[in-house]
Amino acid sequence: MILEALEQASELTQLQEISENLRDYFNVDHIVYHWVSSAGEQYGCGTYDPAWVQRYVERDYLRVDPVVQGCYQRFTPVDWKKLNWTSKAARGFLADALEHGIGNQGFSVPIRGPSGQFALFTVNHRCDDEAWFAFMETNRRELILVAHYFNQKALEFEPDRAPESATQLSPREVDAMTFLAMGYSRAQVADTLSISEHTLRVYIEAARHKLGAANTTHAVARALQHGLIVI
Amino acid sequence: MILEALEQASELTQLQEISENLRDYFNVDHIVYHWVSSAGEQYGCGTYDPAWVQRYVERDYLRVDPVVQGCYQRFTPVDWKKLNWTSKAARGFLADALEHGIGNQGFSVPIRGPSGQFALFTVNHRCDDEAWFAFMETNRRELILVAHYFNQKALEFEPDRAPESATQLSPREVDAMTFLAMGYSRAQVADTLSISEHTLRVYIEAARHKLGAANTTHAVARALQHGLIVI
DNA sequence: TAAATACTCCCCAATAATAGCGGGGCGACG
DNA sequence: CGTCGCCCCGCTATTATTGGGGAGTATTTA
């Protein structure tokens, strides 16, 4: 079974191979896995034409692509047909994509990580709606599972992407960060925690230093990204 | 197959039933699904003793529970044995849990949503390591899939939990929020975007209002939680 | 084509944030 | 019993951020 190959893969370059194997196994045009991040850091592998990938990056299609935008707002895997392709930018993007060999049908599985990591596993194919529907009926479950296994492997090979800062905040620091993230002012937080604003400030600074943050907003953002606070 | 029952479930009360059916189907002690959030809003269903659930909430075990803390920092499903049970609080929690009928073996699947939603799907059982290992070998894949389907159903029944405010930020607003989340000061952001600080402030305020945030930190936190920005 | 949205710029007064300094008490770990 | 981390409180000072106005152009959408 295809999952076995995934579980046994042991080198990063194999992911590319596996994506090709998956493409053949499922008999579709493309299988793509890519990491989504606006901070430059993009990683991806799959069977798209490298020219298209380059064009995608160059044109900053990440901000236009309805697949990315849609999955980013969604909980569950989504068929491309359900996405919103009405905007001018989206239609332009779609036309460009089709010209570069991308199929008209697609299914993307959003995958999320603890630090706001976000990845997409996509199956893409060119066919009519009927054939696509039948394909999805048959393979949806296995595809979802494959998506998660693929992601797990990608993480194993790129440990940098799952940093696990291990930075721990003290309970009071967690409280402070949490209320700040909820929009409380310092005075409100201090009041809520029944401590002086001076003391509160000490916690905020401690958290800021632990998190290597430049300011309070940054500290809250990092605490959220690292899963240290829940709001 | 059990997934069919999940797909066909059409009422919220059925989730409780389904969790019981899943427990019997997999022949384990407990199946639990619960939503994790410190903002009061907790939802859960499953086969744990209600007395334990109440105790869990009362004692604020959410902040102690290594399963929650561990999964919150982790990308992938995790066996409870892999978690860190060394702290005093964690050991006390474990002892308390065992006394309340919780099994010693567990497997939890973290599930994340676009707005920072976080849920756990847990299988719990009392048995020796060997039996548990065999069980997991057999059922891991199906459990992962069941976890995601269960979550999907829970979302359908509780649409409030997937609010999808549809709030969209303009590109410039996204830029502003992103750099702020990265710790840039307003001056730095304005400089980076090559606009005046005054203009930048308009974006920040616009984003704040769109997001219903009380201040900049809150706005950044919400933007992060809603997946509107990535850092 | 009109309406909506996005982008750009400006002033001002009040508030929040940051960076230092100092103090004391508690509990856990070795 | 000493060290370490956490919890709590005080002070001063400068700088940055905030939130309330208003106003014009450009682009996209309906």
Image: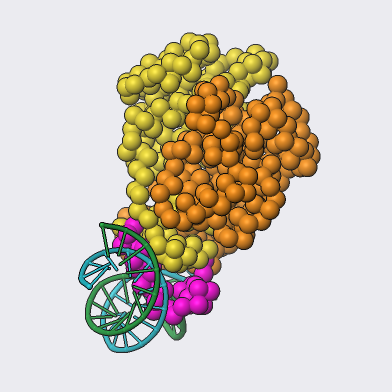
Chain colours: A yellow, B orange, C green, D cyan
- Is residue A116 among what the camera can see? no
Q: Position of residue B203 (x, y in %)?
A: 47, 60
The quadrant of the picture occupied by the C terminus of chain A is: bottom right
Front residue of C25/D25: it is C25
Compared to A160, does D4 lie above or below? below
> What residue lies at 44% left-to-right and 13% top-to-bottom?
A21
> What residue lies at 46% left-to-right and 78% top-to-bottom?
A195
Q: Is residue A168 left or right of residue B96?
A: left
Residue A205, located in which quarter of the rendered image?
bottom left
Q: Position of residue C7 (x, y in %)?
A: 44, 55
Q: Position of residue A168 (x, y in %)?
A: 37, 56
Q: Is residue A89 magenta?
A: no
- Is residue A170 among what the camera can see? yes
Residue D20, located in which quarter of the rendered image?
bottom right
> What residue lies at 55% left-to-right and 56% top-to-bottom?
B61
> What residue lies at 39% left-to-right and 59% top-to-bottom?
A169
Residue B181, located in which quarter of the rendered image?
bottom left
Q: Is residue B229 left or right of residue B18?
A: left
- Magenta residues? A183-211
Compared to B109, does A198 lie above or below? below
Q: Is residue A206 magenta?
A: yes
Look at the magenta stretch and give its main secondary structure: helix
Q: Position of residue B117 (x, y in %)?
A: 57, 47
